[in-house]
Image (spheres, coloured by chain):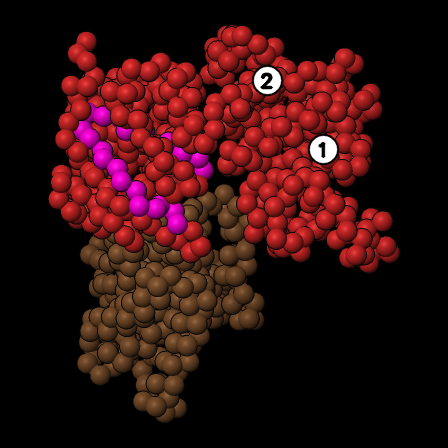
Chain colours: A brown, B red
Amino acid sequence: MGGFLSDTFLAALLFGAVTAAVPLLLAGLGEQMSEKAGVLNIGIEGMMITGAYLGFVGAYYSGSFWLGFLTGAAGGIAVAALMALLCVRIGLNQIVIGIALTLGLDGLTALLHHFQFSRSYPRLPAAEVTPIPLLADIPVLGPALFRHHLIVYLAVAMVGIMIWVYRRTQLGLNLQAAGDKPAALDVAGIDVIRTRTVAVLFTGGMAGLGGAYLANVGAGLFIPFITNGAGFLGIVLAMLARGRPLWVLVGALIFGGCLSMTTAAQVAGINIPTDVIQMLPFLVVMAMLVLFGRRASLPAALGIPYERGAR
Amino acid sequence: MEPIKDHSGPAIVTLDGVTKRFPGIVANDRIDLEIRAGEVHVLLGENGAGKSTLIGMLSGLQQPDEGRILVDGREMPIRSPSHALSLGIGTVFQHNMLVPTLTVAENLALGGRWWQRPKIAELAARVADISRPLGIEINLAARVSELSLGEQQQVEIVRALLRESRLLILDEATSMLTPQGIAELGALMRRLVERGLAVVFITHKLGEAADFGDRVSVLKLGRKVGEIPPEHLRTRDRAELIDEIVAMMFGRQAGDDAVSVPLRAANDDGLLEVRNLSVTPTADAQGLDAVSLSVGSGEILGIAGIDGNGQKQLAEALAGQRPATGGSVMLAGQPLDDLDVGGRRRQGLRYLTDDRLGEGTVGAFPVSVNYFLKQIGEPPLWRSGIERSGEIVARAQDLTRLYDVRTPAVSTPVGRLSGGNIQKVLIARELADGARAVIFNKPTYGLDLANTLATRQRIRDIAGQGLAVLLISTDLEELLSMCHRIAVISQGRLVGIVPNGAGAGERVGRLMIGLAA
């Protein structure tokens, strides 16, 4: 019993990796669209915590996980709308506004939670899983990868959808043009502000959904600051993956694996200080940045508000 | 061939007393203009004459403060770029408007509704229909960043035609093209107007106006100062036309700024000797491949070439700003290879960068300190690390007078001055204290005519004093008017050196595009 290679450990590690990866995947895919369109969306952490809080509240009072995902996504979109107004339409500094949104909403959600639940942390029931027939019966891999909530499979399917959007649709072209050369999009007759706004709202929806999953399915409860940098890891993923959704998935699984080491080790009865394991994702971020970050070329107009006719 | 005048049709766009103001400047002052179908209408003017603003208003990027714009005779404010397109006004901007990371086909598909699939196959057929009669070949699968500037321009012209433009605006379209490319564009414009389009061709080059225009309008400091109608254009020969346009533009007769190659000092030993200078290419910069040249005392050696073929790398390797991987640089018999930037400067090798604000000066520092930027900390202007302001200001005032720098005061931040005056500050700085050889990189780029002429005269004077001058320029006419010999650089190699004289322009032009001279 015990040891790193035991079945228990592997199954717990993989299951935990997927659970931890889903919020990162959703946030990373969302951030990727903003960045493609030329908006550095630092506010994503704030969108995520809002999604976590409203998602939890929605699920807690309605008893429906799906309604929780809906309110979570709506919360993320509401924050994104504010960000789009300030940074895309008015053209304020994206980094300053992003940090302000994140700090402000971390505090606001903590405050609201305190008013509502005082110091208690009510739990949701365990989320209903949808096992995939046949695949779910494979030893070790089955329970780890194919016994999850339906939204997990939908999140993975989003990778394919995003690849299709970027490669095959007019929207994909417009988004890339908005990030690489917004003036070219403008003179082609497409509203740059509107294109970027769509991208930021999408980011908000995905981040909100990711936050709701993190609270409702991952943890089963809301505690203040629960996102704990997941949104920022999403930014890192988007930066490393550049325009490629598949790489967001790969990165999210690697980070998710690191995050789930703690739990998995405990389940398997291995004694490693938790603090060491909690550092892992950040060490991996640095290692990945050293390996791949230097080659990452970001959109030319990333972070620069668009103003027609400006030179 | 049918006579050209039969092509002139009704006015597509009319400007009626259009005025546009920016803070502190009237960019366009009551401009009247008629743009007719079947005509190449040349808008001629120097930098700052108001050409770009006019284009901005025609293409919907800017709105006039006063006056009316009429389309097909009806008043029609052009609200946005997409509105301009829907009115049939297509613009090819000076700085191209293609997304470098997308393919040609994807760029052409930009502008569709977002829920649509880009119809690449249908596009290919339409592009072929449009480009074949015009003699253009478009590679739809190529990524735009891989195309030459001329090819990118053709893509933009085809894009405008795909949108069924009746009026095509070409903004400084020839500035990045080779002489052959310019001739091809001229022929293309001719074919377009023969098909009933109107073309507005913006340029600051007189020769192009005379060669390509059916009608020429001259702008100066925001005003329209003259127009030459087609019937007049056809009855004059080229030289007469140019004289006439010059008189409109500058209010003086041509010939005043006719230029002659300065006489060379008799002792023309090689002062600056470069042997097999090599620089390794990097991901975003051309390398140098065994460049050898020799510049004599009092000689101006030109470096011609299409922009981005290693000109900047050559200048920086000579100045010591970029490490050379091989070869040697000698100044008056002294090897410079082991010296850094400061050491080479002290030996008398000076470099005037083309990046006047980014690299040449510190914009927020006063003019006075910028004169001495390369001597900071050295006596006599600095003593024990302390700045001696009185001395600096006194010397700066002398230099300001000597080099005719137009600045409110020597304490004015240099970034507030015009490009021409910043260039004068740089020249004053680099010629001080024992200059022996001077490298100029695009010294007149972005300057207006008066400052261009003053800078060229200054360079001739420098050579006249016996200094060696290496003049890097992408403006072939500039090189032909100033240099004793012209070397041509292509992909980091010197592909030939042509003595200036009759026929030199054509030989240099052929070398630039890779043909034997």
Can you say whether A60 is above or below A4 in the image? below
Query: Can see residue B21?
Result: yes
x and y percent of residue B110 in the render? 25, 41
Q: Nearer the viewer, mark 1 or mark 2?
A: 2
Same chain shared by disc 1 and disc 2: yes
Q: Which residue is mark 1?
A: B350
Query: Can see residue A207?
Result: no
Residue type highlighted by circle 1: Arg
Query: Of helix, strand and loop, which one carries label 2?
Result: loop
Left or right, residue B423 beside residue B209: right
Give the distance between the C-alpha atoms of the residues marked 1 and 2, in whole angstroms: 25 Å
Please check the rendered image and state whether residue A75 is part of the magenta-colored stretch, yes or no: no
Determine which quarter of the picture holds residue B157.
top left
Q: Which residues are magenta?
A: B26-47
Residue type highlighted by circle 2: Ser
Left or right, residue B240 beside residue B294: left
Give residue B260's mark.
2
x and y percent of residue A85 in the render? 31, 66
- Provide the chain ID for the residue under circle 1: B
Can you say whether B135 is above or below B155 in the image? above
x and y percent of residue B107 in the render? 28, 37
Is disc 1 surrounded by few (<14), some (14 to 19) or many (20+) residues within 10 Å? many
Is disc 2 surrounded by few (<14), some (14 to 19) or many (20+) residues within 10 Å? few
- In the picture, the quarter occupied by the N terminus of chain B is top left
Classified by dominant secondary structure, the portion drawn in magenta counts as: strand
* Front-lying residue, B3 or A96: B3
Left or right, residue B299 beside residue B172: right
The residue positioned 66% from the left and 24% from the top of the image is B460
Query: Of helix, strand and loop, which one carries label 1?
Result: strand
x and y percent of residue B45 in the render? 40, 34
